[in-house]
Image: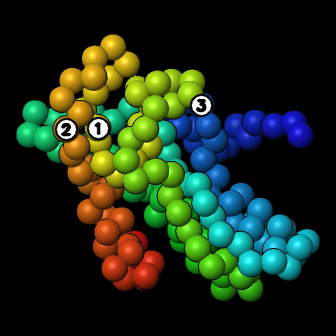
């Protein structure tokens, strides 16, 4: 395959294009081609999350990313795509093969970096509480 840059799409801190509508279009195309149920196993945003002095992590960019993708997923289902599951990437920060611990994915912050393991304490990000609400409402409440 060959990637093509779309200059009209926003990008993550790490250069990945953000395209929730393209996500929906891809779901529709794959389903129309194969007519098999689909589960999304990895969808998420890697970003530079900052641990605040009070232990909070304000990752509204992750919430916005997931909100828009889940909304487009709901529209794809309304279009007739058989989607039976959605899993974001990942629940807890993990090491990136290219950017180490600087690139964080999870709803839970792990207190460490590439040079220092620190205390490995876990902190719930704002996205943790938001996604908990999304799960409890079965995707009805994306606010």
Q: Position of residue 13 (x, y in %)?
A: 49, 31
Between 134 and 96, the residue placed more toward the observer is: 96
**Label 3 vs 2, first from the N-terminus:** 3
Note whether 142 is above or below 103 in the view shown: below
User: Which residue, as the protein is rendered here, is positioned at the far left?
Assistant: 54
Q: Secondary structure at mark 2?
A: loop
**Residue at the spot 38% in from the left edge and 75% down from the top edge:** 135
Is residue 60 visible in the rendered image? The answer is: no
* Foreground tag (1 vs 3): 1
* Number of the label disc, if any, that sits on residue 121: 2
Side of 141 relative to 4 (left or right):
left
Question: Within 10 angstroms of label 3, few (less than 14), some, or many (20 or more) residues?
Answer: few
* Number of the label disc, if any, that sits on residue 110: 1
Q: Position of residue 34 (x, y in %)?
A: 89, 73
**Label 1 vs 2, first from the N-terminus:** 1
User: Which residue, as the protein is rendered here, is positioned at the far top?
Assistant: 115
* Number of the label disc, if any, that sits on residue 15: 3
Is there CB contact under 8 Å for labels 3 and 2? no
Q: Gap between marks 1 and 3, in whole Å?
A: 23 Å
């Amino acid at each position: 395959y060959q990637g093509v840059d779309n200059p009209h799409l926003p990008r993550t801190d790490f250069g990945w294009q953000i395209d929730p509508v393209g996500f929906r279009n891809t779901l529709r195309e794959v389903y129309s081609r194969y007519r098999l149920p689909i589960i999304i196993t990895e969808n998420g945003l890697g970003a530079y999350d900052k641990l605040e002095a009070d232990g909070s992590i304000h990752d509204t960019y992750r919430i916005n990313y997931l909100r828009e993708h889940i909304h487009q997923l709901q529209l794809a289902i309304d279009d007739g795509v058989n989607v039976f599951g959605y899993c974001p990437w990942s629940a807890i920060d993990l090491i990136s093969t290219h950017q180490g611990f600087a690139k964080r994915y999870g709803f839970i912050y792990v207190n460490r970096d590439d040079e220092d393991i620190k205390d490995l304490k876990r902190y719930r990000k704002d996205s943790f509480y938001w996604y908990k609400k999304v799960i409890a409402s079965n995707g009805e409440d994306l606010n």
